[in-house]
Structure formats: structure tokens, C-alpha cells
Image (cartoon, rainbow, N blue to C red):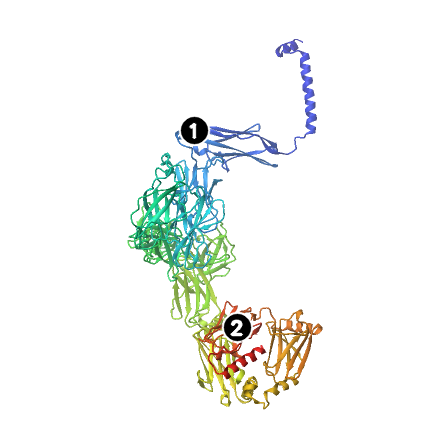
């Protein structure tokens, strides 16, 4: 009890109070137990920041503590990052301290510096997810309180020299690291073009953030060309990067049209007047610019209005007649003989209003009625096109609106108004339309609503003239010199012109030697006399020229520079590497090394070798005279010591850096029987899955000769080497295949002899199995001119020191009796002089100083045979023939011998030989050719028994030859002669029938019948109408004993008379009358008939072309092999009859179609017309065929036709040309011509 009281007194409580407290605790525990059962603690939960990080700004050398509270289940793990880089406290001991107490995580940074500024992140991770909280720490320096806070900026990848085309969009991007990288406080970035600060506009967009700075061009123009500089303010000052942007001309709308002008600016703006100026474009291969058109557009509209009616020759134009207070944009177009250029970029908007200085300088208006006279009237600009007058407004001018009148006077005292009907409100006005070589005086009168005031004082005599006299253009720049810069650029500088004449800049052009095609290097005038030309091809030789530019145009071209081979500028070579020991005899060592990777653009002339003992620091020269090869024997060494070596290479630019010291080599004599190491491993013909490894044989061969080599390889970084070849190779090269594209490999080689395996070579440098960009293979071919068989290779790029080394079986070819090597630029050719079986085999070519450019090709027996055949055809060319020599019997009994070649030139020569005797153009023989069709022909007008024999045509076209023969003897000749005689008699009989009976009486032909009985005989002998399918359609024909087109015959379709047309053609031969239905359709179904009148009776023959007969006809027509929509045909035909006065010029033209392009032949009275001075034949655009007859006479009357044909078929059209009206003739001749005209025309 005493103890209880003592405890109660100590705690200040009695027993009842303690019991109540215990009971309360018990209840709470029970409730918590129930709650735990309802919500188990094992439920997973994604991490969550109950309290996130807070940003801090602290002074330098003070600590900062970042705190956050994290919840989640399982318990999250928190990692700390600075600028997305994991913070490792052990990397900087004492700098960072990471804490974790009861779910509160902290990062303590002690003694902060400016470099500690940045974005810090706390990343909480568990199996359910990840959450990030970020805060910015900004550390201020007390020494920079008076200066703005700039971050540290490090440029990484930045834009280089860029090429674009007008109309494209382009972005210049620079990547950088910003410390601290504050999203709301990016670094201050400024962009410059040619040292002029750029501001955001519709043509330029700028952005910075996320570690990048961008300059975007939504629509490129030549105005955007120039040197762009990115300037960023940093803690240490500024960081800059510059590169040139080239903008090429957009393709012109017309070939030969000039490029668009540029840099259109507007100045001297007044109420209704502005001065527009611009820069001329460069012209290299285009015709010279003859002038410019200026267009204007009101702001808010899309309509451009041309300001000048005729092109202005100078690069500025005063524009007047503008609306006061309106805003305008201007653009310019260049003009030359080929066409008009694309428009330039429009100028910025300018408002037509009073100049601010004029408004401020006005005195308060006085109460006057008429304005005073203007003062100081003078010419502010004079050139060959116009004069610009300027004056000061009148004072006093009154309160009314003032405008001006301009008057001029020339030789008399009579003043003439210049601006009739046009009110001038600006104190400037251009005067056009002034006569050349005449001087004028001008005066100005002020006018308001009350009337005109007094005129101003007249000006002095003013005359249109160029301000520089005849030398309006600048003189040509002086000497142009070019030098190397990089592998794709050159540095060009020149002397300025002696007479600059307000020089704007320069244009630089380049040309590859041998091409004669000049290419512009810059497309916007460059102000300085030095320029770096980019975009050149490495290994090519270029010429350069320069032109000066002013407002009048371009000067004459400067003299061309000396040829420049494009390669990197001269420099000392880099250090050699890979020093290896090849042999040692106890008192000397043979060492070798590899050539420097960069030769400095000049051939390496020597090597300097130094040595030292391994335990010494002093280097000594091996020899006072340098080595010229990469293998050197070092004498006078001490046996048992270790030596180190280093090498320096030298060229024209000087001595390069020394190599790294070699590993220590022991000077001990090699006595082992195995061979020493191979050396100088090199890689050639590197492709995606293969490469060629070459090496040199060991210097130390051992006790017996080397019998072979083994190659081992491994991936870069791997110690596991595998043997490539299972059997030893007895040559110093091996083609390694089966490589992984893009993988890096290393190799080593060892030699073997009878005694066993020799020493391993040093491990090679790593090589990537990937084909170099632009790599081409070794190709075989035949020269098209000489027929020589060759192998050719084109290197992707070369240097001036590059050499093409040709090998057979990878042994350099030194025998020049069998091959010839020729090299031009990046191309090299190996010509086989006398190809034989000995020349079969593996050929390869390697290019030095060209990053391993190489290729190989195996010439097989089958390939060489094909090349032989092609070579023979080139050295012994033939004229390919479409048809052999053939004959054709024409009207009047003429016999035409003809041949068609696939292609002949206009300079072709040929000769016809009959029975071993050459035939020339003479009476009775007409010889001609048509180069467009390839037809060569000879017409024999009098074919008799004396013409029996062999006909030969020999053709010689350039180097090509051909010959074709035709034998006409025996029965074959008799058939031809009989047919020719028959046609001649038929022609005579037709002439007898055509002669009117009123003039000829009862004339009898060779048939022995009067002509009036011929028609009766013809009508009674007519057969039934028959149908025949032709390539053009369906032909209805009626056979009879004798028929001419002059007979009275009529064709009918469903009782409607048919007239000859393009759709329905009517004609005949001596044995039948026919009607051709071209491309029949269902409309042509029906009943057809022909009526033949003999003067008393009508003989009718019919044919039903409908129903089944029509279907069969169409089916037969469409199944013909020649039926094709692409066949040659006449689309727009010739007229039926043409009448023309004598001695006039007649042109017969029709539209034809065909695919491929058809061949067109003109005929007169069924005889081919040959193009000459009188009859000119033309065929334009594959569509329009024309026959032009100059100075038409009676002899030109007749039936003309055109034949259009290609490989799918053909078509023709037949017009008739009656005799022209004669001049003074006798009555009989007039009647004869008149009757003949009516007779023949009626038949058509």
C-alpha cells in the first residue's frame, strides 16, 4: 500500500485514473485490430511523393538540402539525378550526402559552386511503378551581382555548310549543353546573317530549348544565302558557330530563262512615289539579261500589277501613281531572250505617305489662297532610262491640298506640260519618254483648289545619260587565284576591279577541267574579294572565274584561274605507327612501320628514325640521312640490351609528329628454324560481308623456305582468335568472307615452314565490314570508237597523290607489252592490247591515298568471247537493214528498186550497181534517199530486156557498211518485164479513155475499142459485191473487166448516196471498184449497192452488211494481227479538191497518229514524191505531215496521196489538185484544162 501511494504521488494519479487509461488503451487496440483486418497492409501501392522537392537559390560556397517524403508499398527505392545523370557520392567525396530517415529522403550538397546549378531529380521506384520529383538549384556568385546570370553553354553538334533550293523549307540546328538548363530561363541566343542581326519574321523562325537552337526557313529564297552565325551568351562571354548557307535557283518555267532577282528594297517613300531597287541574278549558261519588270500589290490583296510596260535595264525603278496612305509590296522579274524568270521574294510592306522629316519641317499654314512656287528643283537621279525630279514644297502653301504640275522645254521657249491629266502630290517624280541626246529644262508649279501658283525657277539643262558614261558596268576583276582548303572546298581570292562603279558584290563560277560547263558557286552577290567555294568533288580539277556586279548588271568575266586539284590543304603528315621487329642478328635489328594515316596532301619523302636504350631517356638518331622506305636495318647495336624506336615522317610541308615509342625489343640473335613474323597487314576491297587481307612475307625465313600462311581473326575487343583458312595459302593475300555487316574485326598472320609455325604478326588495326559510300566495281567493256577490250574502275574520291595500281592475281602488272593503263581524273582503264587465253584470270586495282578504294574482277573465257564479238562488230560496223533490196512495179510501167535501213545519217553515201556497172542519176534512172525513214530507192523509167541481171546496192554511212543484192534473171525477170509492160499499156489506155470524145473523135486505145464501148463492157461484166477485211476495216469490192475512177459509178447505203470521206473511202483499180469502211461500228450496218451507168442502162450490184454478216465481218476485222488502235492512221485528212492560182505556193497538211511514230510517204499519181527545193516534205512533232509545193505550175496537177504506216498498220488520204487557171492560152487548151478538171474532180 505504501508502494502504491508512493507511485501515485510520483505520477500524480490515483488508481482509478490509471485503470481508466488502461481501459482506453485496450479499446483503441481492439479498434486498430479490426481496422487492420479490414485493410491489410500487404496491398501493393505505387510510389507517391507526399512532399515533393522544392527549388532553391543559394549563394556560392553555401550548402543546400533537398528533401522529399515518399510513400508506397513495397518501400520505394529513391535515386538522385543531376541533369538526368545519376549522382554517385563516391565520385566526389565530401560533395554529396544522401539521407533516408523514416520515409524522408534528402540530398545535401556542401559548399555549392556555380557548376552545381542544374535540375535535380528524385526518382522513387518499386515493383509497382516509378515517380519523379524535380527541382532547380541556382547557385549565384557574389562577384556577378552587377552582371546578368548567364549559364555555361557547350556546343555539341552544330550545322555545317548547307545547300538548299528556292521554294524548299530548311532548318539550321545546333545542339548544346546548358548548365543550368532551366526551362523557363533559356540561354540568350542570337542569329546573324553576314553580321546582320536577324529577327523573327514570316521568312525566318527561331526557337531555343531542350538543348537545341533552331533557325527555320519556311520558304527559301536566294535572299537567305549568306554566312550564318549562332551567338550564345555564356558565363565566360559568348560561344559562336558559323557556317555558310547556299541557295540555288529554282527550276525556271522556260529553259534558258534567268534566275530570280533578290534583295528587293523600297526607299524614298512619299505620298504616291517610291524607289524600288534590287540585285541582279547570276547568269552562267543563260542568255544575258535584257531588263526587269517590277510588280506591285496592295497589302491585303492577291493581285499583282505590273508597274513598267517595257523592261527597265537598271536595277532600280521609281514607281509613282500610288494611292496615298495605302501599303504596298513589290517584286521583280528578270527578262532575257529565252523568257521571264520566276518572281523575286516580295519586299516588306511600305506605306505611301509623306516623309516624316517633311511633315516636321513644315511651317504653320498661313492664310493664303494660292500656294507659292516650289524651290530647289533639281534632278536627284539621272540615268539612260529616266530622270527623277525633286523639289521642296512651296512656302507658304496654304491650308488647301496642294499638287504639282511639271513642265519641260527643249529647243524653243514653249513650255510643254509633262503630267497631263495626272496629279502629282509628292515632291518627287520620275520623267520617262525623253528623247536621247536632247537636253531639257524643267520647272514645277504648285496647284490647289484655288488655282496654280507661280512656277519655280527652271532647272539647268538636264539630259538622259548614264552617270558613268559608257562604263556603266564595273570592269572585270583582276587576277583570280585558287588554293586548297578541304577535300570538298577551295579558297578563291581575286583583285578588285579598277573601275568599281558603285560595286554591289561579286559572283564566283567554277568549271571542271574538260567539261566547259560553268556552275555558279554563289547565288547572291558576295561583298569581299575572297570566298570559300564549297560543294566541290574531291579528286576533280577545277577552274574559277569572277564577275563584278552593280545596279547595271554583271561585268565581263575575269581571267580564268589556274587549274586547281581539289584536296585538303598542305600540312605536315601525322605520326607513323605500328613499329614492328622483323629480324635480329645480335648486332642489328630490322624494323618496319606503317605509313601515317594522313599524309598532309603531299607525298612523304623521307622518314627519320630514332633509338634509345630501354632504360634511358635520351633519344639518338639512327642515321644522319633519312630513310626512304618503311623497312630499315639498324646497325651497331649491343647484344643483350633492349631498344626502343620512334619514327617521324616528312613531306613538303615539313616534319610531322613522332610516333609513339615502340615496345622494347631485345637485341638477341634469332636462331629459331621457324620463320619470323609477316608484316604490313593491309585491307582492300572491303565490302559488307567480305574483305581482302594482304601482307608482306617475313624478312627472317628460318631454316627452310616458307611453305604457307595462316590467318586468324577476332572481333574487336575479343581475345578469342579463330583460324580463317584451314589449309595454308602459298600467297600473301586472302579473301575473307562471311563477315557480319557493320562489325569490327582484327587480324593477324603467321607463316609456316617445314619446322612448324612461325611468329605471329602484330595484330592489325580494326576494320569495319562495310562498303564505302560511292564504291563501284571493276567492269569490263569495249571502247565504242576503237573496239578495244578494257577493264575500267572509277574511284569514289582521290587525292593528288593517288595512284591506280593494277594487278593480276594481286601481283602488280609491270609488263606493258600486253596491257596499257590510262588514267583521267578518278577513272582508270586497263586496255588489253592483244587479248588471248593468257589474259584470262583475276584482275584487281587499288587506289593509294583514297581510303582503301579498290575492286577486282575475274575475266572468264566465256566473257572474253562475248567481248571479242562486240569488239569485232565495232571495228567492222554494218548498217542494219529493215528490208533487203526489193522491187515494185509502179504506174506507167516504171520499176522501183528500194531498200530500207533501220537508221541512216544525212551524210550517207551509196551506189547502185547493175551487172557490175555503177548506175548514176541520169535520164531513165531516178535515185534518191530519205534519212528520216532510211529508204534508199532507184526508179527505172524504161524497163526493157536490157535490164536483166543482178542489182546491188552498196551503202557506206560513217564507218558502217552494208550491201544487198537482187537477182532478176530467167523466169523471174520475165514475170517482172511482163508486168511492167502491162502497166505501161494500161497507162496508155487510161490516157485514151480520159480524152474527151468531142476533141479526140472515135479514139481507140490498145484494146482496139472505141472509148464509148468501154463503159458498156465494164457495166455488163461487173461481178457481185464481195466483202474483204483489211487492216483499216471492211472493203466492199466489185470486179469487172475494165474500170477507171472516171467512170460514172455511185455507191448507196440504205438508198442514200455515199460521198467519199475519211470514214467511207471510194476508189478502184483497173480491175475493180471498191469502197472502204474504216473502223466499222454498228452504224454501218445495212444494205449497200453500187450503180454503174453505161449511158443507157444502170447496172446495180448489192450486198447486205447486217445481222450475222456484220458480226462475222467485225469479228474477222478485230482478229486481224494488224488491228490496233495504235496503228498509223490519218486523223485529219486532206481536202478532196484543191484549186490554186499558178505560181503560188500550196501547202497540203494533215494530222496523223500512231504509236510508235508512223512513217509518212507522199505520192503523186501513185508515184512517191521526193523532197527537194520544189516539193518540201516535213513531219513535225510526230503529228503534222505537210507537203509544200512552191511556184505551182500545170505540171503539178494530179492526184496526191499520203500513206501513214507503222508496225501495226497504216492509212492514207487522197486529195486532188486540178490545174491552176492558165494565163493567156488558146481556146482549145483552155477547154481541155477545164474539161479535165471537171472530169477528174467529179470522180472524187
Q: Earlier in the sequence, mark 1 or mark 2?
A: 1
Q: Residue at x 67, y 82 (%)?
A: 1099
Answer with the quarter of the image where residue 921 lies. bottom left
Q: Is residue 965 left or right of residue 392?
A: right
Is 131 drawn above or below residue 441 in the view shown? above
Quarter of the image that includes the N terminus: top right
Label 1 element class: loop
Q: Is residue 815 left or right of residue 121?
A: left
Dot 2 alpha-carbon crowd within 10 angstroms: few under 14, some 14 to 19, many 20 or more: some
Label 2 element class: strand
Q: Which residue is mark 2?
A: 1159
Is 528 drawn above or below residue 1079 in the view shown? above
Is residue 510 in sight in this rendering?
A: yes
Q: Is residue 1088 left or right of residue 669?
A: right
How far apart are the alpha carbons under marks 1 and 2?
96 Å
Q: Nearer the viewer, residue 1004 or 1211?
A: 1004
Q: Nearer the viewer, residue 568 or 596?
A: 568
Q: Which mark is residue 61?
A: 1
Residue 832, horizontal then vertical, whole percent: 42, 70
Is 1047 drawn above or below residue 843 in the view shown? below
Residue 37, horizontal then vertical, whole percent: 70, 28
Amino acid at each position: 500500500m505504501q508502494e502504491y501511494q508512493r507511485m501515485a504521488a510520483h505520477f500524480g494519479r490515483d488508481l482509478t485514473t490509471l485503470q481508466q487509461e488502461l481501459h482506453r488503451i485496450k479499446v483503441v487496440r481492439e479498434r486498430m485490430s479490426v481496422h487492420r483486418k479490414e485493410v491489410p497492409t500487404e496491398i501493393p501501392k505505387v510510389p507517391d511523393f507526399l512532399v515533393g522537392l522544392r527549388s532553391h537559390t543559394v549563394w556560392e560556397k553555401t550548402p543546400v538540402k533537398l528533401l522529399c517524403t515518399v510513400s508506397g508499398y513495397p518501400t520505394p527505392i529513391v535515386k538522385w539525378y543531376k541533369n538526368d545523370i545519376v549522382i554517385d557520392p563516391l565520385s566526389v567525396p565530401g560533395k554529396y550526402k544522401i539521407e533516408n530517415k523514416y520515409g524522408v529522403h534528402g540530398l545535401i550538397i556542401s559548399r555549392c559552386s556555380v557548376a552545381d546549378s542544374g535540375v535535380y531529380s528524385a526518382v522513387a521506384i518499386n515493383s509497382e511503378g516509378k515517380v519523379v520529383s524535380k527541382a532547380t538549384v541556382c547557385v549565384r556568385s557574389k562577384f556577378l551581382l552587377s552582371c546578368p546570370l548567364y549559364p555555361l553553354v557547350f556546343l555539341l553538334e552544330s550545322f555545317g555548310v548547307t545547300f538548299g533550293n528556292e521554294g524548299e523549307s530548311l532548318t539550321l540546328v545546333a545542339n548544346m549543353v546548358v548548365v543550368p538548363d532551366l526551362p523557363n530561363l533559356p540561354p540568350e541566343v542570337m542569329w546573324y546573317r553576314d553580321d546582320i542581326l536577324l529577327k523573327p519574321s514570316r521568312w525566318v523562325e527561331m526557337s531555343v530549348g531542350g538543348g537545341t537552337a533552331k533557325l527555320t526557313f519556311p520558304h527559301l529564297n536566294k535572299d537567305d544565302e549568306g554566312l550564318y552565325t549562332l551567338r550564345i551568351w555564356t558565363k565566360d562571354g559568348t560561344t559562336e558557330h558559323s557556317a555558310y548557307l547556299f541557295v540555288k535557283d529554282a527550276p525556271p518555267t522556260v529553259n534558258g530563262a534567268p534566275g530570280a532577282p533578290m534583295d528587293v528594297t523600297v526607299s524614298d517613300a512619299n505620298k504616291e512615289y517610291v524607289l524600288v531597287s534590287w540585285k541582279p541574278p547570276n547568269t552562267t549558261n543563260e542568255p544575258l539579261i535584257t531588263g526587269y519588270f517590277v510588280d506591285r500589290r496592295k497589302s491585303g490583296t492577291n493581285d499583282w500589277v505590273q508597274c513598267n510596260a517595257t523592261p527597265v535595264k537598271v536595277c532600280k525603278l521609281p514607281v509613282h501613281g500610288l494611292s496615298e496612305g495605302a501599303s504596298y509590296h513589290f517584286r521583280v522579274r528578270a527578262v532575257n531572250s529565252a523568257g521571264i524568270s520566276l518572281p523575286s521574294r516580295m519586299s516588306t510592306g511600305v506605306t505611301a505617305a509623306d516623309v516624316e522629316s517633311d511633315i516636321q519641317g513644315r511651317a504653320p499654314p498661313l492664310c493664303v489662297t494660292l500656294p507659292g512656287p516650289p524651290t530647289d528643283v533639281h534632278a536627284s537621279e539621272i540615268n539612260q532610262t529616266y530622270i527623277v525630279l525633286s523639289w521642296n514644297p512651296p512656302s507658304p502653301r496654304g491650308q488647301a491640298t496642294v499638287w504639282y504640275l511639271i513642265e519641260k522645254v527643249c529647243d524653243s521657249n514653249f513650255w510643254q506640260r509633262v503630267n497631263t491629266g495626272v496629279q502629282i502630290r509628292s515632291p518627287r517624280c520620275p520623267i520617262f519618254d525623253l528623247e536621247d541626246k536632247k537636253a531639257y529644262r524643267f520647272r514645277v508649279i504648285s496647284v490647289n483648289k484655288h488655282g496654280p501658283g507661280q512656277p519655280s525657277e527652271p532647272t539647268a539643262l538636264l539630259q538622259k545619260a548614264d552617270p558613268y558614261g559608257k562604263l556603266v558596268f564595273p570592269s572585270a576583276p583582276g587576277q583570280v587565284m585558287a588554293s586548297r582548303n578541304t577535300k570538298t572546298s577551295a579558297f578563291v581570292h581575286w583583285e578588285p576591279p579598277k573601275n568599281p562603279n558603285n560595286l554591289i558584290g561579286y559572283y564566283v563560277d567554277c568549271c571542271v577541267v574538260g567539261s566547259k560547263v560553268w556552275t555558279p558557286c554563289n547565288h547572291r552577290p558576295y561583298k569581299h574579294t575572297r570566298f570559300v567555294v564549297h560543294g566541290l568533288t574531291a579528286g576533280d580539277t577545277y577552274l574559277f572565274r569572277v564577275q563584278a556586279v552593280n545596279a547595271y548588271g554583271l561585268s565581263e568575266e575575269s581571267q580564268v584561274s589556274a587549274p586547281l586539284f581539289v584536296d585538303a590543304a598542305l600540312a605536315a603528315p601525322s605520326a607513323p605507327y605500328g613499329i614492328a621487329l622483323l629480324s635480329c642478328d645480335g648486332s642489328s635489328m630490322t624494323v618496319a612501320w606503317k605509313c601515317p594515316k594522313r599524309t598532309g596532301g603531299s607525298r612523304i619523302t623521307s622518314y627519320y628514325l630514332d633509338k634509345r636504350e630501354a632504360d634511358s631517356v635520351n633519344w639518338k638518331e639512327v642515321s644522319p640521312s633519312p630513310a626512304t622506305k618503311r623497312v630499315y636495318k639498324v646497325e651497331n647495336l649491343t647484344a643483350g640490351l633492349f631498344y626502343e624506336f620512334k619514327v617521324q615522317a616528312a613531306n613538303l610541308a615539313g616534319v610531322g609528329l613522332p610516333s609513339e615509342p615502340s615496345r622494347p625489343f631485345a637485341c638477341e640473335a634469332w636462331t629459331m628454324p621457324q620463320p619470323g613474323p609477316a608484316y604490313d597487314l593491309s585491307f582492300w576491297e572491303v565490302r559488307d560481308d567480305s574483305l581482302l587481307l594482304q601482307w608482306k612475307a617475313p624478312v627472317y625465313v628460318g631454316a627452310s623456305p616458307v611453305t604457307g600462311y595462316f590467318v586468324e581473326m577476332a572481333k574487336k575487343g575479343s581475345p578469342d582468335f579463330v583460324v580463317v583458312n584451314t589449309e595454308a595459302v602459298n600467297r600473301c593475300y586472302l579473301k575473307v568472307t562471311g563477315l557480319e555487316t557493320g562489325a569490327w574485326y582484327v587480324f593477324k598472320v603467321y607463316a609456316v615452314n617445314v619446322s612448324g609455325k612461325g611468329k605471329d604478326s602484330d595484330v592489325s588495326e580494326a576494320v569495319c565490314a562495310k562498303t564505302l559510300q560511292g564504291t563501284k566495281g571493276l567492269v569490263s567493256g569495249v571502247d565504242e570508237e576503237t573496239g578495244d577490250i578494257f577493264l575500267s574502275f572509277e574511284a569514289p574520291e582521290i587525292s593528288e597523290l593517288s595512284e591506280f595500281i593494277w594487278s593480276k592475281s594481286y601481283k602488280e602488272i609491270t609488263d606493258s607489252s600486253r596491257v596499257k593503263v590510262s588514267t583521267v581524273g578518278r577513272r582508270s582503264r586497263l586496255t588489253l592490247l592483244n587479248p588471248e587465253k593468257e589474259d584470262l584470270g583475276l584482275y584487281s586495282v587499288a587506289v593509294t591515298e583514297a581510303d582503301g578504294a579498290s575492286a577486282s574482277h575475274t575475266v572468264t573465257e566465256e566473257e572474253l568471247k562475248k567481248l571479242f564479238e562486240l569488239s569485232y562488230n565495232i571495228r567492222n560496223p554494218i548498217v542494219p537493214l529493215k528490208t533487203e533490196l526489193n522491187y515494185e512495179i509502179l504506174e506507167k510501167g516504171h520499176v522501183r528498186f528500194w531498200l530500207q535501213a533501220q537508221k541512216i545519217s544525212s551524210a550517207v553515201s551509196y551506189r547502185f550497181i547493175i551487172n557490175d556497172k555503177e548506175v548514176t542519176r541520169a535520164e531513165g534512172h531516178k535515185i534518191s534517199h530519205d534519212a528520216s525513214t532510211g529508204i534508199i530507192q532507184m526508179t527505172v523509167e524504161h524497163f526493157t530486156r536490157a535490164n536483166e541481171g543482178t542489182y546491188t546496192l552498196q551503202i557506206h554511212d560513217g564507218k558502217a557498211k552494208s550491201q544487198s543484192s537482187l537477182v532478176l534473171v530467167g523466169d523471174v525477170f520475165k514475170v517482172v518485164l511482163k508486168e511492167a509492160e502491162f502497166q505501161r499499156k494500161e497507162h496508155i489506155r487510161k490516157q485514151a479513155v480520159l480524152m474527151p470524145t468531142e476533141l479526140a473523135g472515135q479514139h481507140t486505145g490498145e484494146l482496139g475499142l472505141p472509148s464509148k464501148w468501154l463503159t458498156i463492157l465494164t457495166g455488163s461484166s461487173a461481178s457481185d459485191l464481195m466483202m474483204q477485211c483489211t487492216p483499216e476495216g471492211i472493203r466492199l469490192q466489185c470486179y469487172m473487166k475494165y474500170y477507171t475512177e472516171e467512170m460514172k459509178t455511185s455507191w448507196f447505203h440504205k438508198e442514200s448516196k455515199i460521198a467519199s470521206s475519211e470514214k467511207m473511202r471510194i476508189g478502184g483499180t483497173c480491175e475493180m471498184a471498191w469502197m472502204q469502211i474504216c473502223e466499222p461500228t454498228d452504224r454501218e450496218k445495212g444494205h449497200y449497192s453500187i450503180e454503174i451507168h453505161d449511158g443507157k442502162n444502170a447496172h446495180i450490184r448489192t450486198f447486205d452488211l447486217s445481222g450475222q454478216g456484220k458480226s462475222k465481218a467485225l469479228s474477222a476485222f478485230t482478229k486481224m494481227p494488224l488491228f490496233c488502235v495504235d496503228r498509223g492512221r490519218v486523223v485529219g485528212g486532206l481536202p478532196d479538191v484543191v484549186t490554186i492560182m499558178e505560181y503560188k505556193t500550196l501547202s497540203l497538211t494533215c494530222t496523223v497518229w500512231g504509236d510508235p511514230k508512223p512513217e509518212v510517204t507522199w505520192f503523186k499519181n501513185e508515184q512517191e514524191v521526193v523532197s527537194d527545193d520544189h516539193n518540201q516534205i516535213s513531219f513535225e512533232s510526230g503529228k503534222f505531215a505537210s507537203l509544200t509545193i512552191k511556184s505551182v505550175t500545170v505540171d503539178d496537177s494530179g492526184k496526191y496521196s499520203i500513206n501513214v504506216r507503222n508496225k501495226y498498220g497504216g492509212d492514207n488520204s487522197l486529195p486532188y489538185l486540178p490545174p491552176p487557171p492558165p494565163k493567156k492560152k488558146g481556146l482549145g487548151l483552155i477547154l481541155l484544162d477545164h474539161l479535165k478538171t471537171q472530169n477528174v474532180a467529179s470522180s472524187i
